[in-house]
Image: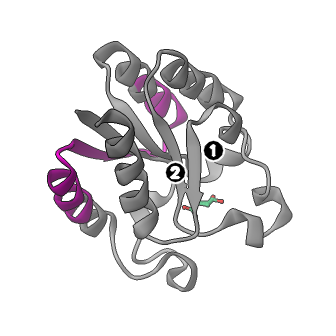
Amino acid sequence: TRVLVLNGPNLGRLGVREPEIYGHATLADLEKAAGKWGSELDLAVEVRQTDDEATLLTWLHEAVDTRAHVVLNPAAFTHYSYGMRDAAAQVTGSGLTLVEVHLSNPATRESFRHLSVVAGVATGSIAGFGFESYRLALEAVASRTR
Ligand code: DQA
């Protein structure tokens, strides 16, 4: 079972970006951890990050075309990108699992973060557990595909 772990803008800056919110671990650390969790769960996990909306949409289209499940941290796109929402809808609409994840819990933060335009087309959402959010998301994918 293949899973694309897709990360949106500024998540390449993990470790240096607002560590009091996002922690000191880097995207490379996340890649390592996700690979390990994937092998424990019998999932082929591929972690990617982009600051570019078009690239993220292309990856979501790729997930549909290659039948890969998706763990998606849309970062700031969460709150306003209808184009990404429409691409995410194609993933779940084609019967694949898409888990929205966040490191922080946006519901406890600024009000502009309270709206997720993706949540309504995701299979489900996990937020607030740091890197553990990704592990829980991979477990969700694994349990739905078992
Ligand atoms: C985030 C939360 C978003 O509001 C923010 O724009 C991010 C990261 C998170 O993982 O907590 O970039 O998605």
* Residue projecting furthest to the right: 111
In reply to whether residue 56 is colored magenta, the answer given is: yes
Color encoding of the figure: one colour
Judged from the image, the quadrant occupied by ligand 1 is bottom right
Mark 1 highlights which residue? Answer: 77
Q: Give the amino acid at mark 1.
A: Phe
In reply to whether residue 47 is colored magenta, the answer given is: yes
Q: Give the amino acid at mark 2.
A: Pro
The percent position of residue 112, horizontal first and vertical second, equals 82, 57
Q: Nearer the viewer, residue 21 or 133?
A: 133
Q: Quadrant of the N terminus?
A: top left
Q: Label 2 CB, ligand 1: below 8 Å? A: yes
The percent position of residue 42, horizontal first and vertical second, equals 17, 45
Instruction: Look at the picture and state if 80 lies above or below 134.
Output: above
Mark yes or no: residue 11 visible. Answer: yes
- What's the residue at 55%, 28% (across, down)? 88
- What's the residue at 39%, 76% (across, down)? 15
Magenta-colored span: 32-58
- What's the residue at 59%, 50% (across, down)? 125
The percent position of residue 132, horizontal first and vertical second, equals 41, 68
